[in-house]
Amino acid sequence: MTLVDPEKITPPLAARVAKNSKVSGTSAIMIGGSTFVSQAHLDGVVKAIKRAVKIPIILFPNNITGISRYADAIWFMSLLNSVDPYFLIGAQILGAPLVKKYGLEPISMGYIILGEGGTAGIIGKAIPVPYKKPELAAAHALAGQYLGMHFIYLEGGSGAKKPVPPEMIRTVKNFIEIPLIIGGGVKTKAQALAAASAGADIIVTGNVIESTSSKQKVSEIINGVKGTEP
Ligand code: 1GP
């Protein structure tokens, strides 16, 4: 899946990134960032992408301000390793009626911040799980599954120097029965292949798409993911 950060992009550029990503085989466009963006700008970005491509648009909100009525679905997520109840359940309570009102499909997801944590870790007041502690990440993920979440997302932090290590992905994957999402710092085909081989069901890329020729990069990463298929 391709992540578009509305803070860093104009609606026309977002449309171009989405088109290029779709041509290269991305499954969905996710929209979200770690800090604040105006509602009007977010709506503009979502509308431009919707006009450009017919693949699902899934919101990836950092707060209730990340909700747009023009998207198809929303990761209805809880930051499982936050010390602030707001990111565990507070924002969700405020946002749920809006999700219903806008007719967005909520997809429940347990979000776990790892490694350096990045901006999301600071904003979300997370205690990031160190990359060297895969069993701790697995315990967080299993708790999310037992609470009824449908997906688990292991977040290495946007722009992370090192993506989530394959060993950690493998340990978590062996613990849970729900699909596993990986994101943060995936920049190459080899990294995508390593994550998919270790058990990642969905790989999210953001930064790498913004920085270079998005068409080629998405193709490269998708080829990496498909390299695991028989
Ligand atoms: C960030 O996991 C996503 O929330 C994607 O990270 O921008 O490093 O690809 P990148």
Image (cartoon, helix red, strand yellow):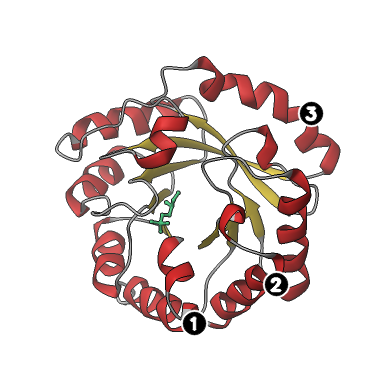
Work out whether 25 lies above or below 156.
Answer: below
- The numbered mark at residue 215 is 1
**Where does residue 65 sit, x and y in percent of width and height?**
69, 37
Disc 1 packing (10 Å; few <14; some 14–19; many ≥20): some
State how far apart marks 1 and 3 are (Cα): 37 Å
Among the 4 quarters of the image, the one containing residue 198: bottom left
60 with respect to 166 (left or right): right
Q: Is residue 199 visible?
A: yes
What kind of residue is marked 1? Lys
Work out whether 177 lies above or below 9.
Answer: above
Q: Mark 3 vs mark 2: which is more N-terminal? A: 2
163 with respect to 61 (left or right): left
Question: Camera-side residue: 9 or 77?
Answer: 9
What secondary structure is found at the residue carrying circle 3? Answer: helix
Assign the C terminus to one quadrant of the image. Answer: bottom left
157 with respect to 86 (left or right): left
